[in-house]
Amino acid sequence: MDLNQKCTQIRRLILKTIGAAGSGHIGGSLSIVELLVVLYEKHMNISPKHPQKPDRDRLIVSKGHAGPAVYAVLCDKGYFDASWLSTLNKPGTNLPSHCDMNKTPGVDMTTGSLGQGFSAAMGIAKASQLRNDGATIYTIIGDGESQEGQIWEAALFAAQHNLSNMIAFTDYNKMQLDGKVSDICSLEPLDKKWEAFNWNVINVKNGNDCDEIDRAIVKAKSLINLKKPTMIILNTTKGKGIHFAEAAGVNNHSMQITPEMIEQGIIELGGDL
């Protein structure tokens, strides 16, 4: 299965997972599918059979509301049984709406309060640097999340400590919970801001293109001798790949999903109901 086929498969799992709950954070889950697939299929040193192996690469999804996308990929990689997906955010579940490292195998950090996961990622990267274990620490932040002051405090720390083992991604889908980022608190020029904080910066024009993402990660890894952390800005589409989610615009941050919408989306993705 090629990466694009894998992305379609993951989108079907996300739709079924959120559909089983009746509602959920579909927009920001769908926008990072390609990134997650490229990371888990091509770049991350992980072992689903040994999820706590000390020298593993880590992924901290600071925009923790994208948990359904993370769960779909972890399930696909064999971290837990597929039956778990139908329990999203239900009593007793191991798959809460936001990622929880104490409940879900393969989740490296509990996240949800925006900005905090990014800070935790910097601490994890610093610990890895001190151990000299060769791990790469990846983290994903949202564009609305980037309005948090804590993001920029963590950015200062990473540059100060030369965390070249840190590769971060901004899911720059231009929308947040209650409107367009440009209307609420514009981030532009985002690349220049990260450069001013002494990070390497790579812009990806189509952040939902697996090949472009792969090339950006390869380039980021080649910059390790510059002794800087790297930010990869992914220009993505919120709700990518499912028509009703894309069409909902800013309303797709968290939305109700009916059985009819599930059926429509699965057919659109070319899968079986």
Image (tube, rainbow, N blue to C red):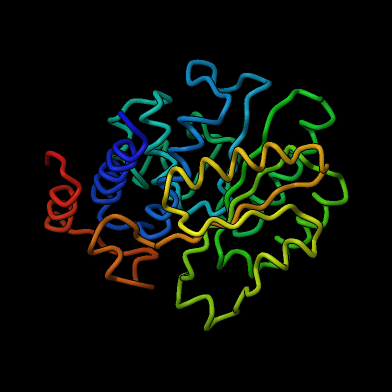
Residue located farthest toward the bottom when viewing the structure as drawn: 183
> Is residue 86 shown above or below 115?
above
Q: Position of residue 47 (x, y in %)?
A: 52, 19
Apparent side of residue 203 relative to residue 223 in the rendered image (left or right): left
Apparent side of residue 56 relative to residue 235 in the rendered image (left or right): right
Q: Where is residue 175 in the image (x, y as percent from the top left)?
A: 46, 70
Instruction: Please name the residue shown 70% across and 46% down the image.
Output: 120
Q: Where is residue 85 in the image (x, y as percent from the top left)?
A: 31, 37
Apparent side of residue 50 relative to residue 55 in the rendered image (left or right): left
Q: In which quarter of the image is the C terminus?
A: top left
Apparent side of residue 224 relative to residue 203 in the rendered image (left or right): right
Instruction: Please name the residue shown 16% across and 41% down the image.
Output: 271
Q: How many labels does the image show?
A: 0
Instruction: Please name the residue shown 83% across and 52% down the image.
Output: 157
> Is residue 234 shown above or below 213?
below
Instruction: Please name the residue shown 19% across and 53% down the image.
Output: 265
Camera-side residue: 24 or 181?
181
Residue located farthest toward the right when viewing the structure as drawn: 160
When asked about the image quadrant of residue 9, the answer is top left
Q: Where is residue 149 in the image (x, y as percent from the top left)?
A: 72, 67
When asked about the image quadrant of residue 34, the answer is top left
> Is residue 23 shown above or below 57?
below
Q: Quadrant of the N terminus?
A: top left
